[in-house]
Image (cartoon, rainbow, N blue to C red):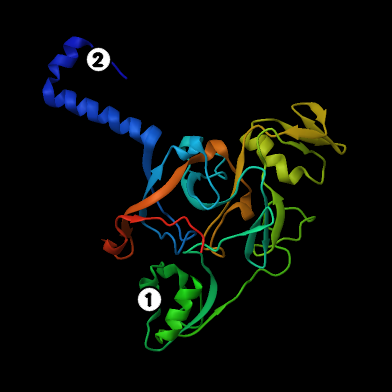
Amino acid sequence: MMRLPWRTWRLLGPWGRAFVRAALVLVTLHVLVMRWAIVQSISMYATLTTGDVLVVERWPKWTGLERGDIIIFRDPTQDHEALTKRRSMVKRLIGLPGDTVIISSGKVFVNGRSIGPFPGETRRYLVQVSDSMPREQLLDLLGLPAELSPRPTGPMELPLTEERARDLLGNGLVERAEPFSASRGRQRHLFPFSARHAWNSDNYGPFEVPRKGALVPLDVDELPRYDRIITQYEGHDLQVSRGQILLDGQRVDHYRIEQDHFFVLGDARHNSSDSRFWGTVPEDHIIGRARAIICSWNEEKQRFRSERWFRTIDQRQL
């Protein structure tokens, strides 16, 4: 603990000394025990929504994370920023180091076993609003931003749970709500951006999550899987010259992974930028695990969502 000179400590007085002690306790809690984070996108809808303020447990980063945990981490794509200055992201942990992840027709399998769905997990639905329900009112009811309805007429593409879609139809709020997927054929913007993998966001993998100490092959075909890990996350120089791989100037055909990595997905599977699009999350990017919502702020309405205060987050599968 920081020590002040005895004379200065006495001059602070009882209230001043109490303030210093409280500040030190808060800093220690923030660094080692828990902190908070604000949800800034709809990628975890309907489990979390924009404006939710989360309590984040720090200790699982060291004691171990589990599949299904909702984790907060630094944005792996912000290479131009120092790690501590990058924005925080919130996603569902799907694959642990060494796991093999496959997404088939939207269903997730880890090491051959199905994982999920989770209580708030949503899919894209094509929704036709009834005449009695203004579009803005429907979005407000669902807790979704108005930007999801850029057109004044026609069907909307909304992230919904199966239960919510049934409720909307049953209550007559919408005329039609049909699940659909735009993921047909190969999507070029998916990680690892290789023509060898005809993957899309609903049919992805098999993808082996890198683990610390694993020896992985390095050749021209496999390089897209690992070049970002090697250069951006683990700080090595990587070059390809005449079909040969040069690591820090030395010819190599294998590489040993230096830290564990994690595969994450957003609960709003068709409204999320996650490991399908930019790869895995390195261990040193992880901040902690979300445990509860302490409050929630609706930016569009400029008011708190009182119904979302002091709620625990259900990490279980359905």
Residue at numbered disc 2:
4
Can residue 158 be seen by looking at this rendering?
A: no
Q: Amino acid at mark 2?
A: Leu
CA separation in Å, label 1 and label 2: 57 Å
Residue at numbered disc 1:
136
Q: Amino acid at mark 1?
A: Glu
Q: Residue at x 40, y 79 (%)?
A: 135
**On-image quarter of the N terminus:** top left
Mark nearer the viewer, 1 or 2: 2
Q: Residue 202's x, y, as percent?
A: 65, 65
Q: Residue 179's x, y, as percent?
A: 57, 76
| Front-most of residues 235 and 117 | 117
Q: Residue 311's x, y, as percent?
A: 33, 57
Name the mark on residue 170. none
Q: Residue at x 61, y 45 (%)?
A: 96
Q: Residue 181's x, y, as percent?
A: 62, 72
Residue 112's image quarter?
bottom right
Q: Residues within 10 Å of mark 2 (few under 14, many from 20)?
A: few
Q: Residue at x 80, y 39 (%)?
A: 217
Q: Residues within 10 Å of mark 1 (few under 14, many from 20)?
A: some
* Label located before the other in sequence (1 or 2): 2
Residue 21's image quarter?
top left
Number of marks:
2
